[in-house]
Amino acid sequence: MGISELRQLGPQRLKDVSIDGTIGEELVRSGKVSRSDALLAQVVARHCDTSLDRILTSEGLVTEEDLLSAHARRSRMRRLSAAEVAVARIADVSLDPRKMLKHGLVPLQDEQHRPILALSDLDQLRKIATDLPVDIATATRVLAPRDAVQGRIVAAHRPHLTDLAQARVNALESCRNWGPRINPRMVMVFGALAILCAVTVLFPRTVLALLVLWATLTLLVTAGMKTAAAIAQLSARPPSPQDETTLGSKEPLPKVSVLVPLFREREMLHALIARLTQLTYPKCLLDVVLVLEEADDLTKEALAEIDLPPWIRAVVVPDGKPRTKPRAMNYALDFCEGDIVGIFDAEDAPDPDQITVVARRFARLPREVACLQGILDYYNPQQNWLARCFTIEYAAWFRMILPGMARLGFAIPLGGTTLYFRRDVLEELGGWDAHNVTEDADLGFRLARHGYRTEMVNTVTEEEANCRIWPWIKQRSRWLKGYMVTYLVHMRRPRLLHRQLGAWKFWGFQAHFVSALSQVLLAPLLWSFWLILLGLPHPLDPVVPRDILVAAGLTFLMLEVLNMTIYAAAVCTNKHKALLPWVPLMHVYSPLGAIAAYKAVYELVFKPFFWDKTAHGLSLGLVRVPAPRASDHAVDLAAVELQPGHERL
């Protein structure tokens, strides 16, 4: 609840509240804030882990300029303008620029070449005071706008910050060292293919029999994991929304940063900002960072036309290689202010109370639970058959399989959005691997390797289902290539991985990745079982008894029925009941994965770091979704109108 709501509750809320000795008193004295609003800000501060400055600016009651002037008068400190900060010389000190960005301070030199410390928030200085070099810790302190301070740091340390963004993760747990070794890798791949082709020519039926056997075994493993996960999830008592929002409610709410990576998202910007304004988390604790690429002029121009609320800001990532989402997030991580860091995509429509649910859940969990994964869903399933099938697949994965795997104690691959991390753990692990095109799946297992856990949280974010075949194949090929990369990276030292994960999670890792990749790559061999079921000849008839082939075909059919049952169970208990008649089409939908898998193998060899971007906005103007439900805690500060087709959130 913010100041706007408290005003409606009457003066009784102001009992036993005082602004004496606070910055609120100075703002009232200078006429920038009314006394009642300053007192209400003190009430909000009792329940939120933030400053009066943030509370007042987030609701648009004062500007940063007003606050800097008030602090300067109150503390008798000199103020620097943005222009003065931009031309001042940087003091040569051994201080990590990432820490300077995080805490909003920069060591400069004055006209007499004496060191001064420019900062935007006195509270942040207390958090970093012990890390400051002696000459800076004792230097004269001056106030300056935060954007100007961070801009000066970036200008002075651009090459270093750019390098750090692509190399934060430990080299042993990253694929970045694949670049210089691309020629040896190509030689190895082509050598292996040549050997496989030669053996196939010499012993065609033997090779086919072995591949069919492997495909069948991995199919059984996949079916076993899916069944166990589905049973584990269906047998668990689902938490109620009341349970989620009341967990840990006695603790002050923490500040939460949300990274929103954007690249060529001009069409999505207005809908995105409108959805973000519907979040009911106190805006004084919300820090939304729109992450833009330096070369993306279209998105920057579109954003310049939007009047952003104070709690949404943009960070521009210097151009560099690889140009990937994880590299951009690594760079923007140091600009975040929150203790919890979340991820949204441009097309996301999160539940309005999602961040409140996440913050309360983190408050009651031990530190070893470092990540919370929400449920992903789609808001355009009725667009065409592909969107319907994609929605069914996501419902089974995020509502059945993934939470079931977590309940069974396996390490789980994360989804790319609706993720929330404890910031200190994320920084400890080095953020994301900038070269891995499925940085989310990779990070899920890196968390597990270092003793941390991920839990599912009962909150939903809706996305735009990829509704065109070629864009779908490109997106899925990127995911599969990332799966291949993730498996190869973590299996560099299998004994170390086994020791870090433990036997249960290690073999779960093997079963998940090896089976998933084998299934999409060897899918055509499994389709050959339809020949047996239809009474037609099979290429293995001369070497395998027909009874065995028939038994294998029946097993294949039973497992297909099992898959359909899981899909049906996933959609029959939520808002997607209308998709039940479309479940049989999943058998037509799944073969698209094989095409994507072969594209992924090609790119793994020739373009391992290439990010085949997913096109968004394909449903603009076509999909109408319900307006957001009313909330007692919602405050629309941005006054951004929702665009047609995107009224949901």
Image (cartoon, rainbow, N blue to C red):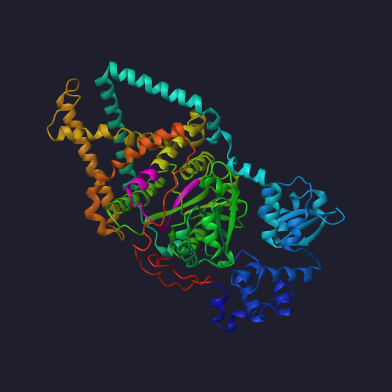
Q: Is residue 8 left or right of residue 526?
A: right
Please give the name of the residue rendered at 36% of the width and 54% of the height, measured from the top-left corner.
Answer: 465
Q: Is residue 132 left or right of residue 313?
A: right
The residue furthest bottom is: 11
Residue 613 point in image, percent of width and height? 44, 47
The residue furthest left is: 535
Residue 185 point in image, percent of width and height? 48, 26
Q: Is residue 589 magenta?
A: no
Residue 649 point in image, percent of width and height? 43, 66
The residue furthest top is: 202
Residue 150 point in image, percent of width and height? 68, 55
Seen in the picture, residue 477 relative to 633 is either above or below; the reply is: above
Q: Is residue 257 visible to us here?
A: no
Please give the name of the residue rendered at 56% of the width and 68% of the height, measured from the top-left corner.
Answer: 307
Q: Is residue 468 magenta?
A: yes
- Span colored in magenta: 453-476
Which image quarter holds the N terminus?
bottom right
Quadrant of the rendered image containing residue 536: top left
Quadrant of the rendered image containing residue 350: bottom left
Say which of 619 and 504 sits in front.
619
